[in-house]
Amino acid sequence: MGTETDVVVIGTGIMGMASAYHLKRNNPQKRVLVVDRHGAPGQGNTGRSNAMFRNTFSSRDNQILSDSSIDFYIHVQDELKADVGLQKIGYLWLMDEAQLSRSGPYLERMERSGIETVRHDRRELKRLLPNLVTEFSSDAEAALMNLPSVDGGIFGPKCGRLDPDKLVRFYAREFLAMGGQLMLNTEVTALIVGPSKRLGIEGEPFVWQDSKVEGVATAGSGEVRAETVVLAGGAWENELLEPIGMESHVKAKKRQIFSIQSKGEGLDALFHAKGFNPLGLLPLVILPKSGVHFKPVSEGNFWVACEDQVNRPYIDLPEHDLERYQAERKYYDRSVYPILTSYFPDFKGSPVRSMWAGLYSYNTIDSTPFAFKKDGLVVVGGDSGSGIMKGDALGRIVDALYRDEEEATLFGDVPYRTAKIGFEKRDVEREEWVI
Amino acid sequence: MGTETDVVVIGTGIMGMASAYHLKRNNPQKRVLVVDRHGAPGQGNTGRSNAMFRNTFSSRDNQILSDSSIDFYIHVQDELKADVGLQKIGYLWLMDEAQLSRSGPYLERMERSGIETVRHDRRELKRLLPNLVTEFSSDAEAALMNLPSVDGGIFGPKCGRLDPDKLVRFYAREFLAMGGQLMLNTEVTALIVGPSKRLGIEGEPFVWQDSKVEGVATAGSGEVRAETVVLAGGAWENELLEPIGMESHVKAKKRQIFSIQSKGEGLDALFHAKGFNPLGLLPLVILPKSGVHFKPVSEGNFWVACEDQVNRPYIDLPEHDLERYQAERKYYDRSVYPILTSYFPDFKGSPVRSMWAGLYSYNTIDSTPFAFKKDGLVVVGGDSGSGIMKGDALGRIVDALYRDEEEATLFGDVPYRTAKIGFEKRDVEREEWVI
């Protein structure tokens, strides 16, 4: 049993589907097959994400990758008339003086790149968000938690929310319409390495032979042989790369989302905070402590999340079972809730309606994505929690790598040199503007 | 049950013991305790190594780290009169024209750093090694293997062999004599993270608390609490780091050594090849294909090894069982032997007397070691198979990091800026002169 194709793409997350779409679009004569263990595209970590996008990064590379991807998604929704649920509600970072001062150089860099931000002072914030607590001088619990005051805010207007499921389905639909193929409910268990020139001796490839990736093994559907394999496996990439002695520098951390039911008028008013965007909606709000942030979802419903680093394990992925990674109610109650309700007391007593967990695929070197081609294999990933907002650009880079182009053309005719995002000649800035 | 100390060092390999020695030497008032799962120092991968050293690296950092460490080992043996089995037999790289040409810039860089190398042309090599095969124009099997010819050689005279066991025992003996302590037969199972300021609330540390590493958990000997933990765990570092959300970029590959019994006069003459060093011994010889290399060990005995990259898995380390990593006889017979005997037919028919495997701890970013301090923890490693030859310098850097010194002083009064070998402000060159 087996299949033969020109290009096999592993993974139907945003990276895999954007890659497959651009590969098929630019190489219409090539057979492109996408394999995924789920029964529909985007059912792994893409579907579990916080569903947000921003172009406010410190690294020039992340600025370009996100800004051009967002432009494409806007184009898809406004011009191609395919709804991807995109709404520019904005991001609002609340900061104390020290954080504002550290942000200065990054904001200047964004300005030079044409990335718009707006600075609010404390007084303006109090006007826009009347119930926001900005100081804790007389609060013993806040003192215990060493909470920074809110001395100002940075607002990013070309940031917002979208629907990852709709976005992935857009790519999948167009990919299929062009003649691309999906092989769903099929788990890739291994990359197959073979000799570049087969001699017919048992045990090939030997050390003295050149070798290359020549396909994938699957559970239940035999081998898929291909001229090129594209690995867009997210958190699971190293599980496939390590057995063949390769490495993607990806490590996964669990990230959790808590869906909070609004209780009371205070939260309802917060949901409809005016003055940030034409939609009359609260933006995503990032608190000055421990990466706690929240956003309005639908009437009476907020999602709260937190990006803790120290002591949050990198997790082993011995099994392909995302379900094992459960959200922890204690984590919300003891670590997130005390911070959240100190700044926004309106959340006090609002119940957790549901919660879930997904995985961030950190690029542990510089928190910036990578893509490279080697020995018949193209690998893309390391988005470090911002894969959706950079997915289209990365898909175009994968296609350029496949065609051995030195430069990819991102949406909006933005050129991007492919070698700089690989590892051998890596030339990207470490991302400093993280949540 | 528990222990309290000032500094606990994890691992008695070369990194751990050199660190412990320099820590105790420069901080005599501090209690330094070294923990290791083995019953004696250096019984992990240090004791399984090929027992060689060289100062011939392309990266300036590796040049400095190795050159100063070698100088210290010579000092130990010649001036402190502690035999560490050090003999400068040299390294001889055999290369074809293309390889020689690519080496040019690295050799120039070595020359500028005062690293001596000697170039031999083919004629000189044939004089020194009469039975060396340098061309394969009429050899069908060699053509199949695509073996490069030997057009010249690069000899490194300040390279050679030493006894890792004696070296580690030197450090351990001196460390104990200064009042340092060893806790052997004790496996470290976890790093303990606690809040920087303890509040006495169950479940600490929470996300809103600062936290730090405050000790280690062991199997059988309870917890060891310490102001600073030094992790020198080699291939096992990530097993301890990942659960606390940290990362060392170390991944391990199995490396094998095959001990070959000399059979016949040809090999005996090769063993005593004249003209390379005052000892009248063959140097370590590196063949132009697949990193196959061999060295003379004792009368009638050679060790043969190979550094294959592609398709050699990074291995999982779910258990602390080095014994599981067995050498593979088929690997010698099918991958190493055909290359070895093509260049040196004298090896034909010589039996494998014994074989074993150890692990190289690759720093997957740039094949250059790292050392950094963060949150109560100092981590050192990533030597990528050259830990012994850089061990002393790294031990001094660990001590400087412990004391928050910006500069370490390596043997021979060589200054070395500690931040450049960390990850946050890493400023080292990727090593290109690899075997």
Image (spheres, coloured by chain):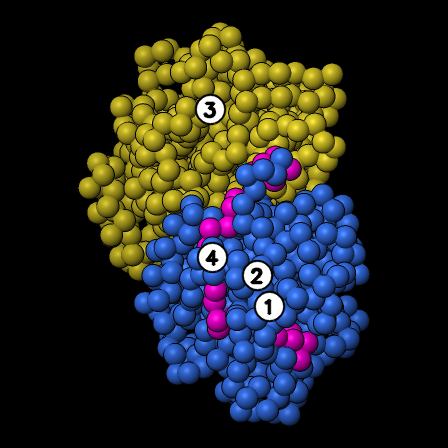
Chain colours: A blue, B yellow
Marks 1 and 2 in Cβ contact (< 8 Å)? yes
CA–CA distance in space, label 3 to label 4? 54 Å
Q: Chain ID for label 2?
A: A
CA–CA distance in space, label 2 to label 3? 54 Å
The residue indicated by pointer 3 is B19
On screen, B4 above or below B374?
Answer: above
* Local secondary structure at mark 4: helix
On screen, A103 above or below A183?
Answer: above
The residue indicated by pointer 4 is A123
* Local secondary structure at mark 2: loop
Position in image of residue B417 (x %, y %): 32, 34
Query: What amino acid type should be assigned to the residue bearing mark 2?
Result: Leu
- Judged by depth in the image, the label closer to the viewer, 2 or 3, is 2
Question: Foreground residue, A179 or A133?
Answer: A133
The residue indicated by pointer 2 is A129
* Local secondary structure at mark 3: helix
Sequence-earlier tag: 1 or 2 = 2
- The reply to whether residue B290 is in sight is no
Quarter of the image for residue A20 reads bottom right
CA–CA distance in space, label 1 to label 3? 57 Å
Marks 4 and 1 in Cβ contact (< 8 Å)? no
A25 with respect to B25 (left or right)? right
A116 with respect to A399 (left or right)? left
Q: In the displayed orientation, state which residue is furthest to the left.
A: B112
Residue at position x 61%, y 38% in the image: A139
Query: What amino acid type should be assigned to the residue bearing mark 4?
Result: Arg
Position in image of residue B206 (x %, y %): 66, 39
The residue indicated by pointer 1 is A273
B203 with respect to B114 (left or right)? right
